[in-house]
Amino acid sequence: MTETIDHTPETARQADPFPVKGMDAVVFAVGNAKQAAHYYSTAFGMKLVAYSGPENGSRETASYVLTSGAARFVFTSVIKATSERGRFLAEHVAEHGDGVVDLAIEVPDARAAYKYATEHGATGLQEPHEVSDEHGTVVLAAIATYGKTRHTLVERSGYEGPYLPGFVTAAPMVEPVEKRFFQAIDHCVGNVELGKMNDWVAFYNNVMGFTNMKEFVGDDIATEYSALMSKVVADGTLKVKFPLNEPAIAKKKSQIDEYLEFYGGPGVQHIALATNDIVASVRAMRAAGVQFLDTPDSYYDTLGEWAGETRVPVETLRELKILVDRDEDGYLLQIFTKPVQDRPTVFFEMIERHGSMGFGKGNFKALFEAIEREQELRGNL
């Protein structure tokens, strides 16, 4: 394995050619947005805050906006496809199943961001334009990325509404949780075809000024049967991090191969959610029906020898199947859900960081073996 770490000086970060403020929203196209919103309200402890649908002028789609701290998910389904956008969403769900169509990024200046991106090779999908209502004005633009995913560039400093113009404040679907399960989006992982990872790394380098944060290749990111390669790109402040995976040649079908087959091409594989208390979150989510990947007890037998002491006792980690990784900066705790829809595609990660800005390098083998056990059960290994 080779691991590289970005040591860009702070002065260079301040001169970022494509400044961002953070992730604005992860937008899903789903078959039934109302049911999806209910699931994420109950199982992920999120709070419904905004809605757009026929009742307030959106005749073609229904969209539900849920938040947990700074994390925002938007679930959209088609009621009746009469426009190009409606047909795109309907076809997307038919071809890919429920999945992410937009990794929206908040920027201080959408016009400048779009101009820089398109001048450096990005395909523009939507030129900068203003949308307004009684709460103010938002500037939106959009560029294409891997597969049918897009990045909407959102400039919302002049807006005080619940989400975007066209949305109204909505009451929670269920009783809000006393303590939220997570407070932010840590990173979003994309799967691309064999041989395309470096192309997309170069895209983010050139088009958005992102830097290479980490790189994982070689035997330590492989099991006996399958392998993959991964590189991580991030903006100058490390607020937006996009790991990019591609399959590697191995004896059997990798998790990336399985995703590409069932998703029907490149797309967002998983979303990592930052939590301050992974133990409480995992307990609550399990109780609400979320299924997590299993980890053999043998993983925990020698955990203390190489991972050191963490704030969570080993026996609690063993009970909840939480993984640990440590690097020169600290440690992290992480766990992965099983796919959250019938297709073995999109899943989630819960991550609690204590200094470490890594991605669980020491857990790759255990994680991939856990995924392979699930692939074998599905008959896809």
Image (cartoon, rainbow, N blue to C red):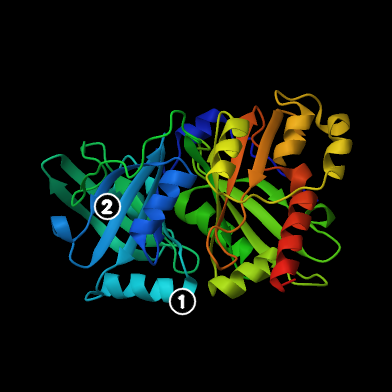
Horizontal side, residue 80 vs residue 285: left or right: left
SS category of the residue bearing label 2: strand
Decide: marks 1, 2 in contact (CB < 8 A)? no
User: Which quadrant of the figure has residue 358?
Assistant: top right
Residue 174 appears in view: yes
Residue identifier under label 2: 140
Between 347 and 215, the residue placed more toward the observer is 347
Amino acid residing under circle 1: Glu
Horizontal side, residue 159 vs residue 231: left or right: left
Rendered-image quadrant of the C terminus? bottom right
- Mark 2: few/some/many CA within 10 Å (<14, 14-19, 20+): many
Residue 310: % across, % down: 74, 25
Measured Cα–Cα span from mark 1 to mark 2 = 27 Å
Residue 24 appears in view: no
Amino acid residing under circle 2: Leu
* Farthest residue, direction left: 134
Q: What residue is at 86 percent from the left and 33 percent from the top?
A: 306
Residue 318: % across, % down: 77, 37
User: Which quadrant of the figure has residue 192?
Assistant: bottom right
Q: What residue is at 15 percent from the left and 57 percent from the top?
A: 55
SS category of the residue bearing label 1: helix
Residue identifier under label 1: 95
Q: What residue is at 52 percent from the left and 47 percent from the top?
A: 210
Horizontal side, residue 160 vs residue 101: left or right: left
Residue 203: % across, % down: 52, 59
Q: What residue is at 22 percent from the left and 68 percent from the top?
A: 60
Q: Which mark is residue 374?
A: none
**How many callouts does the rendering have?**
2
